[in-house]
Amino acid sequence: MHTLSIVTIVGARPQFVKAAAVSRAIAAWNESGRSPAIQERIVHTGQHYDANMSAVFFDELRIPPPAVNLEVGSGGHGAQTGAMLDRIEYAQRTTGRRKTNRFSLFSLWFSVSLR
């Protein structure tokens, strides 16, 4: 049986809110016993590192903790975006996924692969 692997990338308030709904839907899918099982891996860009702009969302929205924090930090829009893309690509390359399709849905990024 295949496992569907989804990487959810979050970094700003709108993505946290959407990720909470996605994470709950994934948990419900897995609890139902349907196939394929879905493994979610959350990646935090780290562009907001203050607890009031980051940790509070994981806590209050009950989002699973991130598997990876890219630690992008502050900076200009172009510099942050470039750093995020570079670090996201590196994180994906180092996971050993064979076939990967990337999606952008409502500013919430996903990377999906079948194992």
Image (tube, rainbow, N blue to C red):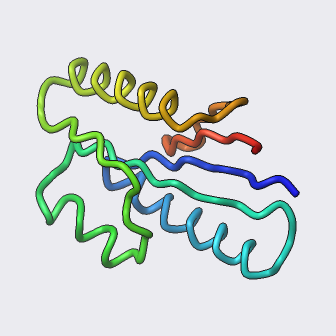
Compared with 103, 89 (above or below) is: above
Quarter that holds the N terminus: bottom right
Residue 47 in percent (x, y) is at: 22, 42
Towards the viewer: 57 or 45: 45
The C terminus appears in which quarter of the rendering?
Answer: top right
Q: Residue at x 33, y 69 (%)?
A: 58
Snapshot quadrant of residue 9: top left
Total numbered circles: 0
Q: Is residue 73 left or right of residue 99?
A: left
Name the spot of residue 44 as percent of width and height, x first.
34, 49
Image position of 81 with respect to 31: above or below: above
| Image quadrant in which you'd find residue 90 | top left
* Left or right of 87, for residue 52: left
Could you say where residue 68 lies in the image, as x and y percent from the top left? 36, 49
> In the figure, 62 relative to 3: above or below?
below
Left or right: 15 as drawn, with respect to 48:
right
Snapshot quadrant of residue 52: bottom left
The residue positioned 46% from the left and 54% from the top of the image is 42
Q: Nearer the viewer, residue 97 or 56?
A: 97
On the image, the x and y values in percent for residue 55 come to 23, 66
Q: Is residue 29 above or below residue 114?
A: below
Residue lying at 59% horizontally and 73% vertically, measured from the top left = 24
Q: Residue at x 55, y 44 (%)?
A: 106
